[in-house]
Image: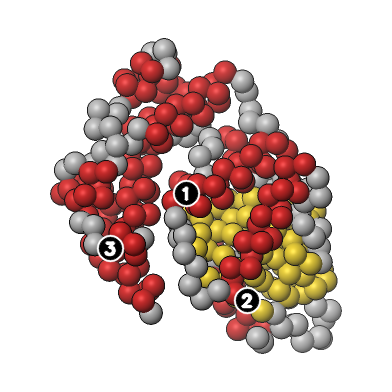
Amino acid sequence: MPFDHWQHAVSEAFVPLEVRSTAPKGADPLPGTLRSTSLGAFHLSEVTGQQIEVRRTPATIERSDPGMIKVGVQLAGEGRLIQHGREAHLTPGDFAIYDTSSPYELHFTRHFSMFVLMFPRGLLRIASQDLHALSACRIHGGAGMGALVSTFLTNLHDAVDVDTVSTSRVLEDAIVDLLIAALHAEVPPSGVQEPALLRSAMSFIEDNLDDTTLDTALVASRHHVSTRYLQKTFEAAGHTVAGWIRNRRLEKCRHDLRDIHLSGESIGAICARYGLVNSSHFSKLFKETYGVPPRAYREQKTLSLIG
């Protein structure tokens, strides 16, 4: 497509971005292509072009900050990703993760093709400090865990050409778990004791979202630490225990609400499955978090799937 159309399409497909051509002065900007599809909570895109710069600036973040994570897999050509003062030089097969809530840059001097996987930050079960440390770190696609995950992501890229792709929570969790494994194999999480406690507590919460008694005291008790110490551990990662429990429950509910296979199940049954037994309170929390009531959200997603 012509560069000006491609420029607008790229910003619309992801988050607000500043995109400019770096073609020689006097030369027309070169065209590019963009293909996208959805896979559950994931947005999959293949982007091609040449001689461009992409910037996520404080101004574009202020315009819209949906709190998304992006994974860029270099399919052809070379690219440079810059975030948090780090620069990842990507060659075919390499990939890197970056956070749309912080400024970043992408530079492509020649023809390139990149597969971009985008999903809500809440799905990535790692601490904020670890995300900061892992952003814009090149994961080599030719060896170790990086090679395994690169092959998986490259095969996942084929789904961009499929109109309707079925998914499940198991598949979504598997994608995220593979990414976390590759990231931590390249850059181990910071610290020892507290991150280990944090990951264990988050895993415990994930496995017990259906328990209506799940709270800070229960999580602390099961890990043989005080509630104060557990709170401080979560706060160091930019969270609270109660907030993490609430957000994980809401995200699970949101996933089930957009699952067409669960369209016959009541909203009350879905929220109760994750420990939210007060449906009116759930509706209030859901609207505060996602901007629309759960019923309207379900209707929107159902119509988009049918359409």
Establish if 54 lies above or below 222.
Answer: below
- Quadrant assignment for the C terminus: bottom left
According to the picture, the residue beneath numbered tag 2 turns out to be 34
- Residue 60 visible: yes
Circles 2 and 3: CB atoms closer than 8 Å:
no
In the depicted view, which residue is nearer to us: 4 or 224? 224
According to the picture, the residue beneath numbered tag 1 turns out to be 170
Q: Amino acid at mark 3?
A: Ser
Instruction: Give the class, few, some or many, for how many residues have Cα within 10 Å of label 1's Cα (few <14, many ≥20).
Output: few
The spot of residue 260 in percent (x, y) is 34, 64
Cα separation between marks 2 and 3: 31 Å
Q: Residue at x 72, y 42 (%)?
A: 145
Q: Amino acid at mark 2?
A: Leu
Asked which secondary structure carries label 2, the reply is strand
- Residue 104 visible: no
Q: Amino acid at mark 1?
A: Val
Which quarter of the figure has residue 291? Answer: bottom left
Please state if 2 lies on the left or on the right of 224 as rendered: right
Q: Residue at x 45, y 31 (%)?
A: 202
The spot of residue 140 in percent (x, y) is 78, 48
Q: Residue at x 49, y 26 (%)?
A: 200
In the depicted view, which residue is nearer to us: 262 or 72? 262
Q: Which mark is residue 130?
A: none
Please state if 97 lies on the left or on the right of 101 as rendered: right
Q: Which mark is residue 263?
A: 3
